[in-house]
Amino acid sequence: MSVKKIDVLMSSGRITLRSDESPEYLQKLASYVDQKITDLKAKNLSASVDERRRSLFIALNLADDYFKLKDRYTAQDVENSELVKEKTELQAMNDKLQKENAALAEQIRNLKTDYKHVQKLLDDFDNRNSKVVDEVDDEKIIPLTAQDKRKVAK
């Protein structure tokens, strides 16, 4: 941007400034300083002090505002850094939990497959057992006597 002459309004009158800033921004600055002057007058300090001291009080007020804002900015910057660090930690924790979740989902799928396999084995066993019971009922198989059981045990 190029340096331009810009008029701003203050309670003391129109002031011409040279700047590359926008007219709106410079008017905002002028209004802020004007408000500081008005605040100082409201405290009845301006009548009892010379122009040099009045300017000094205004400058100190502006410096006070500046340093308070700078401290707030610094505190927010520190808080922001902490939040960024916490976000990074939470993202890492989320990634870890997603991997654990995927592993658990795989285990569940495997258990379901195993369950189906065991259920099929049980069904097959029940079918064979039913056939054996049917054969015993049909007397195709003769139960062992106590003497036969002792022979088998030896």
Image (cartoon, grey):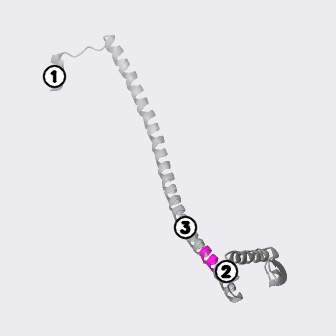
> In the rendered structure, which amino acid carries the disc numbered 3?
Glu
Question: Nearer the observer, disc 3 or disc 2?
Answer: 2
Disc 3 versus disc 1: distance between alpha carbons? 87 Å
User: Disc 1 marks which residue?
Assistant: 151
**Quadrant including the N terminus:** bottom right
Q: Left of 93 or right of it: where is 68?
A: right
Tell me the element at label 1: helix
Check residue 45 in the rendering and tell me which mark sits there, or answer none. 2
Residue 101 x %, y %? 49, 48
Identify the residue at horizontal 67%, vertical 76% (top origin).
43
Q: Left of 73 or right of it: where is 20?
A: right
What main secondary structure does the magenta stretch of the protein show? helix
Check residue 79 in the rendering and tell me which mark sits there, or answer none. 3
Label 3: how many residues lie within 10 Å, few (<14), some (14-19) or many (20+)? few
Figure check: 153 above or below 25: above
3 or 2: tag closer to the N-terminus: 2
